[in-house]
Image (cartoon, rainbow, N blue to C red):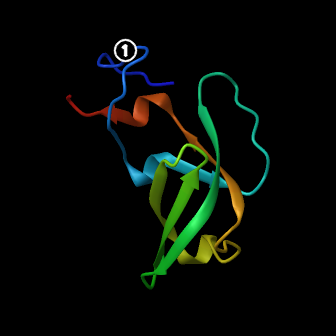
Amino acid sequence: MIDNECARDGESRFCCIRPEAMRWSGSRIESNGSTNVLDVYITKIVNLGAYLEVWAMHASGTVFKALISAGRATHLAIGDAIQLTVDPKAIQLLAA
């Protein structure tokens, strides 16, 4: 679900999601219909000191990358299945 005037059903587009707009959770999240909930698994973790750069992949092959405070991400490991939530207003479609 994308809340953007450029969105058109059936068209493939590239988009940008600010990393801070994504929420990562190891617990099961139920969508309330106004938020995107995606099942992903962690493929890469890069320690940047105060932050971790976390890469996760969806079954479609789409890769998501976010910076997470190292103190909040100590439980994450490569191969972990997690859920990612994104507010539709945080998704910016790029012009075709």
**Going by the image, does 72 lie left or right of 80?**
left
Residue at point 47%, 53% (across, down): 63
Relative to 60, residue 48 above or below: below
Where residue 61 sits: x, y (%)?
51, 49
Q: Residue furthest left?
A: 95
**Amino acid beneath label 1:** Arg
Seen in the image, is 65 located left or right of residue 71? left
Pick the front one: 96 or 6 = 96
Outermost residue, right direction? 28
Q: Secondary structure at mark 1?
A: loop
Q: Nearer the viewer, residue 91 or 64?
A: 64
Q: Quadrant of residue 9?
A: top left
Q: Residue 72 at x, y = what percent?
A: 62, 70
Q: Look at the picture and state if 35 lies above or below 18.
A: above
Q: Residue at x 65, y 21 (%)?
A: 33
Q: In the drawing, does residue 53 fall left or right of residue 23? A: left
Residue at 63% across / 41% down in the picture?
Answer: 38
